[in-house]
Image (cartoon, rainbow, N blue to C red):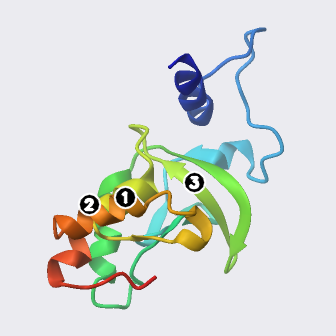
Amino acid sequence: MAGATIAALAVAGLATTATGRRYEPSASPLPIAATTGVPTSIYDGDTFRFGKLRVRVWGVDAPELETRFGPAARAELVQLVADRRVTCRDTGQRSYDRIVAQCWNWRGIDIAAAMARTGWAVNWSTYSHGRYLADQQAAQRERRGVFAYGIQPWR
């Protein structure tokens, strides 16, 4: 339990070392100021910006903005971040000039898990190795998001 708490605090940037220094992830390609911040714009259900830095949410795939369900997926992401602080951990991967990062909202909710659980994104097992599959399956069973329309995952 203590390890999980420390990990959560470390992700949020609130943990300190034994010497009292603030925890900062080492070797992060993201500048520390951009790791945590308020998104300045949200493009679709899995992409947003911190200023000029484009972030692709790791592990899930959401409908593209110009598709039938794209605006609804974007609206769900807007609700999840709601002009509040988002903390991201860069995976080191890149996709179309975007960093690929695991991200949490101000409440510590994994954004990818929430998008999959609401049915507005699907687990992208090539990258997530099934991490969000249970969330996606719950959305399918409960007919949430795209699954309310009988749509099957596009991944």
Which numbered disc covers residue 134?
Answer: 1
In space, the residues marked 3 and 2 are separated at their CA atoms by: 21 Å
Look at 32% across and 73% down and name the residue there: 73
Quick check: marks 1 and 2 in contact, CB under 8 Å?
yes
Categorize mark 3 by other alpha carbons within 10 Å: few (<14), some (14-19), many (20+): some
Residue 63, quarter of the rendered image: bottom left
Q: Nearer the viewer, mark 3 or mark 2?
A: 2
Direction bottom: furthest residue: 67
Residue that label 2 marks? 138
- For the question of whether residue 55 can be seen, the reply is no
Residue 111, quarter of the rendered image: bottom left
Residue 14 on image: x %, y %? 59, 24
Which numbered disc covers residue 102?
Answer: 3
Secondary element under disc 2, as helix, strand or loop, is: helix
Instruction: Report the amino acid beneath label 3.
Output: Gln
Quick check: marks 3 and 2 in contact, CB under 8 Å?
no
Look at 67% across and 43% down and name the residue there: 33
Indicate whether 61 appears above or below 6: below
Q: Earlier in the sequence, mark 3 or mark 2?
A: 3
Residue 41 on image: x %, y %? 47, 65
| Total numbered labels | 3
Secondary element under disc 3, as helix, strand or loop, is: strand
Instruction: Report the amino acid beneath label 1.
Output: Ala
